[in-house]
Structure formats: C-alpha cells, structure tokens
Amino acid sequence: MVEIGFKLASELFGPQDLINYAQHAEEAGFTFAGISDHYHPWISRQGNSPFVWSTLGGISQVTENLNLITSVTCPTIRQHPALVAQAAATVASMMPGRFNLGVGSGENLNEHIYGDHWPPAPIRIDMLVEAVDIIRTLWQGGMQDYEGIYYHVENAQIYTLPEELPEIYMAADGPIAATAAGSCGDGFIVGGRQKKLLDIFKETGGEGKPAYSEVSLSWAETDEKAVGLVYEFWPLMAVKGKLSWEIATQTHFEGLVKNVKKEDIPKRILCSSDPQAHIDKIKRTIEAGFDHIIIQQIGNNQHEFIDFYREEVLPEFQSK
C-alpha cells in the first residue's frame, strides 16, 4: 500500500504554523508527515528554523492518527547521537506508534556551527552508521557504555522509553549512503525519484523495507504563480549538483542562486495548477518502487495546497 505524506518545511515556517499545517494535513487525508531538522534555512528569505523536537511535541498534542518522521535529522555533529536517542524516545512516548526517526549525514550549513571540522562524505556516512548503533544501544534500556571510532558514551541510560521503539530510516544521496541504509537502516529516504539508489538499497539488505521519496513541487492557481513561489522561496531547486552538502552559510547559497532565472525553474521542478500533473508525478514515483511519497509544497500557500490535495489529488490514491 502506498502512503502519501506532507512535508513540514522548518526552513520556511515557525513552530506554530508547522503545528497548524500538521493538524490540517491529517484532516485532509495525508497519512503521515515528514519534518525537516535544520539550524539554518537555506537562504535568509526563507526566514525560519525552529527546533524540531519542540515542534514535534506540539504536533503530538493536536494530531491523533498522523504518523511523523524526521526528514531528516543528522545525529553526528550538531546533535550527539546520545542526545538524539533521548529526544526521539521522548517524542515516540508522546505519540505512541506514530513516530519514526529519519537520519542522514547532514549538511555543512547546519553542522558547522560549533566550528567542528566538516569531514568528507565517506567519513560522514561512517559517523552516521556508528551514531545509529549508539541510538539502538541506548534504546535497549539500562546503563550503557559505548567506545566507538567517533563517539564515546559513558554510564548513559534513557529512562523514558516508549513501549514501541521508533524505526530508523536512513537517507542517501549516493551509492555509499544507500549501501549503509540497506545494511543497517529499517527503511530508506531519498530526494526525488532516484531509482538507482533504491536498487542499491534493496540489493544491500533493504528488500521489503519502507522506501520514502521526497517530492518537491509547487502548486498555485496558475502555473506562473507556482513558478514564482519557487523563485521567491526556494530558487536552489533550479541548481544542479551536490554542492548543498558542502556550502556553509546562507550568504553563499544566496550567491549561488543569483543567476537562477524563472525560466530555469520548470525544467527542474513541477510547477503546475493541474491536478493531473501532480497525480502523474506521484504515479511515476510509485512506479519507480517507492511506497511512501512525501510531498513538499514550495510556497507560503500551505493551507490552500492542502485543500487542493484533499479535493483533487489524494482521492486518486486513497481509492487504490
């Protein structure tokens, strides 16, 4: 069964707005929501970056059936894995059976804030694998010690544990990370329709595990307005390559997108007022092998977008 989720973009909205969107998304028929975990927005124009664990606590109090997943938390530099283990256990206790932990190797934009060295991608992935092992060790309960290559945990015990532990889904944007997700993750998260990475995940131990694809798009009353929303709030969508993981500041991202033109945007991201275009986009992602689709609406018209999906898009998949 395919599930359609809604993306709560912490880069664009404050905590109370995110809580309201989660409540509205549940009412509209989205079965789950993914929420980003950033210290900074990508560009200053986006204007927000609330602490994800506080926001999740608020969401737990206004929803009843909506499942939540961090998409994604980096438990390696800015947040020590022992702290993430405690935070995720607390959230899972507040929404029993409704929370899973999505993790990734992070971006320099968020992880450099203490002045730590930003390691190359293979090292970051090794750190992530060790972090996941620490989280699972602490979730066993009791007093725990851990001596790893990157982390040391001494006499640590998480006392507040949920009856049902979250699953840990690992994000990937390359073969090494996809292999790590297949071997030690409970599920897989990827941006877009990256079937090659999904195949690697399945071949390395991920067969039969949940596979999440985050699909970014823009809806408005006209296609032109939809393009304008991306151009205003997320012009980075038009930039190719993987520089996003390496750039350290919003100022540098703003310099990177200065040459983006409006006409570049529809070539990179769906900007459409047509319900069928949205339905077809989701169907192509499902055909690629993904069973959980996280829809991220780019723009400040989130409530209107949720109503549009409630009426025009979600019924196509709820009847299946």
Image (spheres, helix red, strand yellow):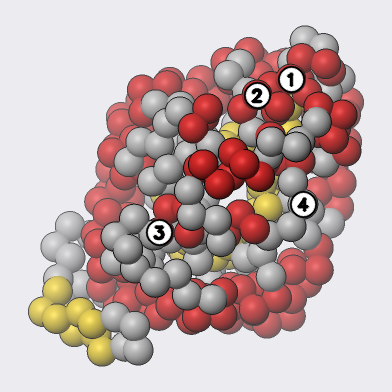
Residue linked to disc 4: 240
Foreground pick, 9 / 161: 9
* Chain-order first, disc 1 or disc 3: 3
- The quarter of the displayed image where residue 160 is located: bottom left
Circle 2/circle 4 CB separation < 8 Å: no
Left or right of 270 in this view: 294: left
For the residues bearing labels 1 and 4, Cβ distance under 8 angstroms: no
Give the alpha-carbon distance from disc 3 to disc 4, as whole Å: 22 Å
Image location (x, y in percent) of residue 163: 28, 58
What whole-number distance in Å separates the C-alpha atoms at marks 2 and 4? 18 Å
Q: Secondary structure at mark 1?
A: helix
Q: Position of residue 313 (x, y in %)?
A: 77, 25
Amino acid bearing label 2: Glu
Instruction: Residue under label 1, please give it.
Output: 228
Residue topped by disc 2: 232
Q: Which amino acid type is shown beneath numbered disc 4?
A: Lys
With 153 as the anchor, is 308 left or right in this view? right
Please say if the residues under marks 3 and 4 sit with CB atoms less than 8 Å apart. no
N-terminal of the pair, mark 2 or mark 4, is 2
Horizontal and vertical percent position of residue 17: 42, 21
Q: Are marks 2 and 1 in contact (CB under 8 Å)?
A: yes
Residue located at (23% from left, 82% from top)? 152
